[in-house]
């Protein structure tokens, strides 16, 4: 079976620091992958390269047969809009927009009518148990609620891949558990691929597969062809 | 407080240096303008005081007075302590010349400031600008009017380097018959009336200019606020108290604004010669007029530094930066409709004044009340701005169908005060320009109409003759008429008569010989020996000739006005004017000849036009600064939100979408309040004019300059936003932002 995401020979440096030193990686459609590793190991850079946020110095990334690294910024923007969703640790909601308006943004960007976008956003909030928080501003939400709104926004366009960077890193264990459960339920239900960076082994345990990045390289067991 | 900590906290990065440079530049611009405006205000008073000797006056001469000590045609009758003075306004090529004809015995003890000796008959003293003008022209166009140059009038007694002033020596016998002749004993310590109108305009202009300057300073001191907050939060984390952080912010701003203010003082001194070229009342300034005293400069510097520093410290304390920074965005208090009250109050004051004036009720302190009403309306507009912005934001947030519209609309409705602040300078500038442009349209009401069929050409000189003199003395004989007609460029010489009805001359009844009327080619002339011409034809109305009902007897008519037609060239007009003054026709000295444009200018004193020019200049400066403020505010807001904007790019919004957000955030408040500013500007101008003139004047359509000013404001706003969004790609570069 052809992998949804294929990375080959990824190398990326920031000045004198080599963040990625030749990474080959395959991720299957619908797979939940936890990316682990110590701070500064290159986890976030890997995620950014896979999502087309950052272009590698060398190597290629293809998603669903599209060579991401060969696309223009405009085409990569369009790809991120239609195929990818993103969740980060904190501060990702637009502070001036209510929860429901935050969720409508990707839909509006995709050309959906406002009324339809609002309906879809309300549904997404309902699925995450946040129907009552629709008109609240991010500043009025708890950390867990804000993360669930961010997940709803990331998934409302039904992307192929959800990239999550420490999605529960700023939450207490109970809230983290709730957020993670909700996110996994949604991605599994929709068959969405999840690439999730985490430091927490308990969080990683929810994944289908764990890969470890160390000094810009995958641990031996995670390399393509060895798994 | 440790100096190293302050240094690291304040200038620890390249971005911080840029911010400090921005603050310094903003304060420097503000102080420069404040000092120049202060100088101009003082300069207006200084030049009035300096030239007050020209307003010297005294008892008018009573003809035929035979009492002991009475002034007669004999120069000796003046004694040593009196001179005879006849002031008039002469003209050359549209410029006004203050002409003071003076008769004084050579032994006179009376002195004129700035003149070595009193001129004797045939001599004159002139201002340097007039001497230059005379030197550049043939004598028969200007110089012959005055005689022989005896010396120049010192700059120290002139209002402006442009001042055209001449003191002409004359015989007492030549002046005593003039109606303007008066007996003067001193030219010093003459009471003068300050140009309060101009000073009022200077104050209003200063408010109009200084408001955007204060705004600019406020915006630049808030530059990079987000990065700065992070820096201060770090200091708090490692143990700095809120007081320490506030002290650092105060110190930082005090030092920066001190440098900016001192640069401003230097810039003001350097720009003084350029600023002095601004013409007020048709005259530029001496650069020294615009100089402020060292004390004033020190006060401006001290006030600027103190205000900026205290505000900076207060802002930081209010921001309540904790060890973890500001984790949640500080919400703005939603503006309430009460913000509309000051605007309603200002308009109410102006309306009440207007209604009372129209009802002919006495309004005490009218001028002060109008200034209060105007100022309240201006402040009211600024206070109402955030509420109207909120309103616009709500509509946009609700109605928008695009992501950019939803984001911009919600941003505006959550931060209406900050959003409006960035455009408030332009809003005030547009309000002011609308008020002044509308008010200036009244200047056109009194302006002479241009040339046209049936109208006396504006190239025709009109010479009024003194009706109190014996008609025989000044009747333009054929010989005189021929002499005038022989002047190169003169096309015809026509006499207009009045008739002595027994109760004096009836100047409303102007009569002409039919042949002369035909020579004017102004329209059909009825077949009669003597015809009547409407008197307003001399001020530009269409000429209408009717048969004279009063008389047909030419011998009974008294010459009252002489019209000298010219080919329209300045040389021909000035040659004719010079010839008239040098005795071509006797009895003309009381009022020099002028075209109907000259006479219209005399009536208006070009004040309204002068106000408009000043206003446009001030508002031009204000608009430029406001545009700069908008650009800085937009860039600053963009930098502070760069992570958020980059996140939008990450989610798939392209750069065009981000540009739309930034543009909408600036455009919505501008459109919401700008239309109101324009409407209010016209309304306020109408109320003020009607209030001041009891309904005598009303505003009209403004001229092209107004459209130009509005267009310039719009272009500036667009440029400011365009300049800001041009950095958008770099500022939201996905690779340069950390997502975590």
Image (cartoon, coloured by chain):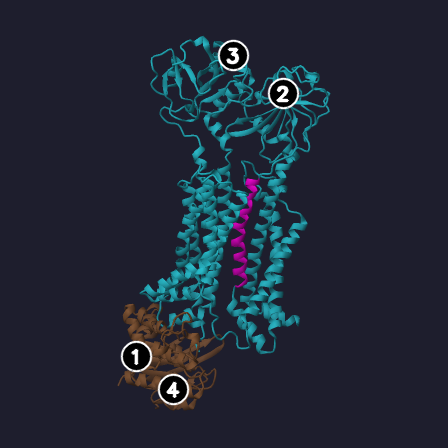
Chain colours: A brown, B cyan
- The quarter of the picture where residue B111 lies is top right
How many angstroms separate mark 3 from mark 1 (CA)?
108 Å
Tell us which disc is closer to us: 3 or 1. 3
Residue drawn at x 42%, y 46% is B683
Q: Earlier in the sequence, mark 2 or mark 3?
A: 2
* 3 and 1 marks in contact (CB < 8 Å): no
Instruction: Look at discs 4 and 2 and give the one toward the viewer.
Output: 2
Residue topped by disc 2: B61
| Protein chain holding label 4 | A
Chain letter of the residue carrying label 3:
B
Span of residues in magenta: B196-222
Q: Is residue B25 above or below residue B106?
A: below
- Image x and y of residue B620, in percent: 48, 47
Which mark identifies residue A160?
1
Q: Residues within 10 Å of mark 2 (few under 14, many from 20)?
A: many
Q: Which comes before the other along the chain, label 1 or label 4?
A: 1
Disc 2 is attached to a residue of which chain? B
Whole-number angstrom distance, CA of label 1 to CA of label 2: 105 Å
Q: Is residue B529 visible?
A: yes
Which label lies toward us, 1 or 4? 4
- Residue, disc 4: A178
């Amino acid at each position: 079976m052809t992998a949804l995401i294929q990375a080959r020979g990824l190398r990326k440096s920031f000045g004198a620091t080599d963040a990625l030193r030749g990474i080959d990686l395959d991720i299957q459609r619908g797979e939940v992958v936890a990316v682990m590793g110590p701070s500064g190991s290159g986890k976030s850079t890997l995620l950014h390269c896979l999502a087309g946020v950052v272009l590698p110095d060398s190597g290629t990334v293809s998603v669903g047969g599209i060579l991401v690294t060969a696309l223009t910024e405009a085409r990569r923007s369009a790809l991120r809009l239609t195929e990818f969703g993103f969740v980060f640790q904190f501060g990702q909601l637009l502070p001036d927009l209510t929860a429901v308006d935050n969720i409508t943004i990707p839909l509006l960007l995709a050309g959906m009518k406002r009324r339809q976008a609002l309906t879809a956003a309300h549904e997404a909030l309902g699925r995450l148990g946040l129907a009552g928080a629709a008109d609240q501003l991010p500043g009025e939400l708890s950390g867990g609620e804000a993360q669930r709104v961010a997940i709803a926004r990331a998934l409302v366009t039904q992307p192929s891949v959800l990239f999550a960077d420490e999605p529960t890193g700023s939450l207490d264990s109970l809230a983290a558990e709730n957020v993670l459960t909700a996110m996994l339920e949604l991605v599994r239900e929709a068959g969405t691929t999840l690439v999730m960076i985490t430091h927490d082994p308990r969080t990683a345990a929810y994944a289908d597969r764990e890969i470890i990045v160390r000094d810009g390289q995958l641990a031996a067991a995670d390399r393509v062809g060895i798994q | 407080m440790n100096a190293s900590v302050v240094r690291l906290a304040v200038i620890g990065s390249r971005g911080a240096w840029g911010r400090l440079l921005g603050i310094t530049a903003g304060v420097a611009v503000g102080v420069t303008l404040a000092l120049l405006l202060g100088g101009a205000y003082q300069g207006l008073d200084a030049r009035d005081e300096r030239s007050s000797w020209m307003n010297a006056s005294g008892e008018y001469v009573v003809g035929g007075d035979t009492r002991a000590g009475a002034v007669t045609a004999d120069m000796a009758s003046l004694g040593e302590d009196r001179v005879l003075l006849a002031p008039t306004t002469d003209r050359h090529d549209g410029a006004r010349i203050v002409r003071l004809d003076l008769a004084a015995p050579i032994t006179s003890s009376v002195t004129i400031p700035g003149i070595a000796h009193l001129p004797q008959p045939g001599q004159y003293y002139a201002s340097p600008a007039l001497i230059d003008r005379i030197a550049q022209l043939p004598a028969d166009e200007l110089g012959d009017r005055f005689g022989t140059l005896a010396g120049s009038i010192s700059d120290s007694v002139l209002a402006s380097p442009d001042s055209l002033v001449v003191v002409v020596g004359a015989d007492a016998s030549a002046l005593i018959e003039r109606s303007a002749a008066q007996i003067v004993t001193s030219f010093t310590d003459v009471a003068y009336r300050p140009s309060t109108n101009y000073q009022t305009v200077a104050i209003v202009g200063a408010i109009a200019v200084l408001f955007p300057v204060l705004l600019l300073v406020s915006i630049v001191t808030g530059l990079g606020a987000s990065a700065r907050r992070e820096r201060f939060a770090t200091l708090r984390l490692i143990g700095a108290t809120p007081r320490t952080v506030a002290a650092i912010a105060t110190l930082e701003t005090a030092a920066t604004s001190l440098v900016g203010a001192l640069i401003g003082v230097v810039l003001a001194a350097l720009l003084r010669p350029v600023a002095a070229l601004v013409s007020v009342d048709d005259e530029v300034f001496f650069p020294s007029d615009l100089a402020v005293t060292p004390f004033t400069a020190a006060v401006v510097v001290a006030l600027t530094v103190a205000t900026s520093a205290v505000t900076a410290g207060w802002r930081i304390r209010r921001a309540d930066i904790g060890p973890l920074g500001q984790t949640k965005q500080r919400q703005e208090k939603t503006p309430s409709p009460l913000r509309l009250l000051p605007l309603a109050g200002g308009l109410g004051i102006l309306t009440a004044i207007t209604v009372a004036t129209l009802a002919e009720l006495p309004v005490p302190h009218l001028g002060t009340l109008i200034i209060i009403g105007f100022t309240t309306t201006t402040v009211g507009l600024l206070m109402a701005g955030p509420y109207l912005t909120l309103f616009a934001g709500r509509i946009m947030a609700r109605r928008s169908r695009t992501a950019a519209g939803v984001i911009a609309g919600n941003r505006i409705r959550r931060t209406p005060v900050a959003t409006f602040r960035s455009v408030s300078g332009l809003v005030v500038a547009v309000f002011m320009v609308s008020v002044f442009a509308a008010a200036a349209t009244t200047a056109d009401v009194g302006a002479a109409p241009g040339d046209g069929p049936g109208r006396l050409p504006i190239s025709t000189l009109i010479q009024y003759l003194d009706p109190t003199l014996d008609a025989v003395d000044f009747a333009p004989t054929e010989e005189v008429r021929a002499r005038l007609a022989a002047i190169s460029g003169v096309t015809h010489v026509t006499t207009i008569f009045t008739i002595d009805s027994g109760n004096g001359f009836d100047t409303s009844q102007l009569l002409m010989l039919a042949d002369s009327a035909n020579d004017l080619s102004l329209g059909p002339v009825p077949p009669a020996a003597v015809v009547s011409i409407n008197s307003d034809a001399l001020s530009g109305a269409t000429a209408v000739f009717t048969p004279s009902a009063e008389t047909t007897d030419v011998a009974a008519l008294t010459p009252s006005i002489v019209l000298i037609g010219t080919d329209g060239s300045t040389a021909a007009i000035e040659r004719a004017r010079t010839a008239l003054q040098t005795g071509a026709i006797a009895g003309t000295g009381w009022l020099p000849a002028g075209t109907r444009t000259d006479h219209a200018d005399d009536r208006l004193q070009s004040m309204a036009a002068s106000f408009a020019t000043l206003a446009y200049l001030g508002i031009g400066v204000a608009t430029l600064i406001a545009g700069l403020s908008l650009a800085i505010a937009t860039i600053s807001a963009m930098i502070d939100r760069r992570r958020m904007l980059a996140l939008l790019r990450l989610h798939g919004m392209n750069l065009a979408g981000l540009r739309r957000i930034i543009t909408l955030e600036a455009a919505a408040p501008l459109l919401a309040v700008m239309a109101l500013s324009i409407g209010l500007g016209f309304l306020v101008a109408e109320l003020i004019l009607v209030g001041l003139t009891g309904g005598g004047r009303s505003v009209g359509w403004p001229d092209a300059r107004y459209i130009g000013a509005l267009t310039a404001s719009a272009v500036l706003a667009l440029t400011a936003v365009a300049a800001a969004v041009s950095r958008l790609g770099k500022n939201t570069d996905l690779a340069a932002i950390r997502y975590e």
